[in-house]
Amino acid sequence: MFNDNWSTEQIERELALKFSSLMTDQQSDQSFDQRLSREDVQGLAGVLSKMSDVLENQSLFRSEIRSLRDEVAELRRERRDSERLQREFVEGFEKDIASLKRRISSKESGGIIDFPPAEFLSSPLVICSDGEYLGVQGKGKKHFSLEDFVQLIERKMSDFMLVETSWKCHSGHWILVVRTEDSAKKREQNIVLVAKKTITPNRNTVTEIIRLNIDGNDAPDALLLTLFRQLKGVFNG
């Protein structure tokens, strides 16, 4: 300030103003520190304690949510298993009813109950095309059988769909007659399937379809091939 040609009085006033401002700032800081230490320390400790409790509760809530999610997942698995068992039970029950209906129908008609042996029904169902035996293999190396074919037909039975099946043995061949009646569409269909026991060149015992007649018309080989391709999709679905 002397180098700038300030007078002594100017320098004193300037220093007084700056010192006064510094003192005011220091007093404010001291006053804030005193207020914080006297009034807010306990409150701040309480806030920190509450925050700690909140974080602890949040952790407990997350653990509980995980437990609930695991419980819900287990309940869903149990429900799926229960639905699967119930569906299998219903399908088996429907199969038994259809079989019983066939037997009752045969008795009422005065005939002898005629039904293929279990081996014939469970053997791989095949068709012969150009000297080759073609069948349908599903998951787990299980072959599509005549029994599976009948079950697919009988599953169509509902309040609107009547399905009647009957068997007859003739000249060593088994004849399956299927009659369906769709009350909603007012349409009937008659299917006749003729099958026989065959030993393939590889010495495998199979059930061979030798004729499929739909509403009086014999199905050509091309239609049988198409049918087996569709059965492969259904059987593996």
Image (spheres, helix red, strand yellow):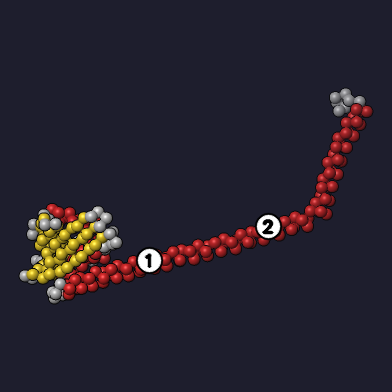
User: How far across and down, in percent of the image, does residue 105 sit?
Assistant: 19, 71
Q: Nearer the viewer, residue 96 or 3?
A: 96
**Mark 1 or 2, closer to the camera:** 1
Residue extending farthest top: 5
Reading the image, the residue beneath label 2 is: 51
Helix, strand or loop for disc 2:
helix
Reading the image, the residue beneath label 1 is: 83
Residue extending farthest left: 171
Specify whether 99 is left or right of 11. Answer: left
Q: The residue under label 1 is which amino acid type?
A: Glu
Specify whether 131 is left or right of 159. Answer: left
Point 26% across, 62% down: residue: 157
Q: Quadrant of the N terminus?
A: top right
Q: Quadrant of residue 29?
A: top right
User: How far across and down, in percent of the image, does residue 95 sit?
Assistant: 26, 69
Helix, strand or loop for disc 1:
helix
User: How far across and down, in percent of the image, does residue 233 sit?
Assistant: 24, 57
What whole-number distance in Å separates the C-alpha atoms at marks 1 and 2?
47 Å
Q: Badges 1 and 2: C-beta atoms under 8 Å apart?
A: no
User: How far across and down, in percent of the image, does residue 130 sit?
Assistant: 8, 57
Q: Which mark is residue 123?
A: none
Q: Earlier in the sequence, mark 1 or mark 2?
A: 2
Q: Quadrant of residue 9?
A: top right
